Amino acid sequence: MERCGRNFTPEQLQTIQSRVEKWKETDEMALLIFLLIKTRLKMKELLGWFNTDPEKRKEYLKDKPDWLGGYISAPKLFPKTHQAYLKQWKRVCSQWFGIHEATFEMVRRINRNDVFPNAASS
């Protein structure tokens, strides 16, 4: 099955938006997807420098510190590997939408203005 053209439907985008907004304070997967949508960062960057360097993270989010709440200064936000998060994301999408081969690229293809109207400036 080809992955490169698959996208979430508008209804699925609304579900993702509402759930990650609601759960980002207590669920690391929700926070990861929230940041993947709201920022222009790639997964490699989110799990790389953004994850491990609190000073660079603060600088990057200087205009939006509320995005991370109390986690802005955490030494490490995401302790798992890319593969572990991908498996978890596939499981979540399977439960929520019946999509069995979801990818992070599907999230990155989201038109940020459709999901977060004020995200164009980020």
Image: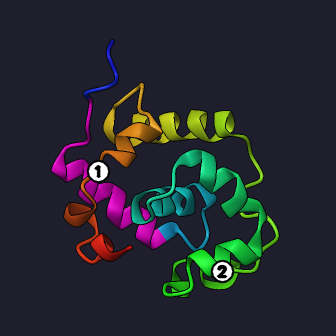
Residue 31 higher or lower than 80, as above or below? below
> Closest to the observer: 42 or 22?
42
The secondary element bearing badge 2 is classed as helix
Quote the CA–CA distance across marks 2 and 1.
Answer: 25 Å
**Is residue 7 highlighted in magenta?**
yes
> Dot 1, how many residues are within 10 Å of its Cα: few (below 14), some (14-19), or many (20+)?
some
Rendered image coloring scheme: rainbow
The residue positioned 19% from the left and 62% from the top of the image is: 114
Kindly give the residue lying farthest to the right in the view shown.
75
Inspect the image, locate mark 2, and give the three-letter code of the amino acid beneath it. Answer: Lys
Image quadrant for the N terminus? Answer: top left
Of the numbered discs 2 and 1, the one sitting upstream in the chain is: 2
Q: Residue at x 27, y 78 (%)?
A: 118
Tell me the quadrant of the picture where the C terminus can be found: bottom left
Q: Nearer the viewer, mark 2 or mark 1?
A: 2
Q: Give the side of residue 53 with respect to residue 22, left or right.
A: right
Numbered range of the magenta stretch = 6-22
Q: Is residue 4 left or right of residue 63?
A: left
On screen, residue 53 versus residue 62, left or right, reads right
* Residue, disc 1: 110
Which residue bears the numbered disc 2? 58
- Pick whichever, 93 or 49, lies toward us: 49
Instruction: Residue 86: give x, y in percent of width and height.
Output: 57, 36
Q: From the viewer's perspective, is residue 23 above or below residue 97?
A: below
Which secondary structure type mostly characterizes the magenta part of the structure?
helix
Residue at left 48%, top 42%?
A: 92
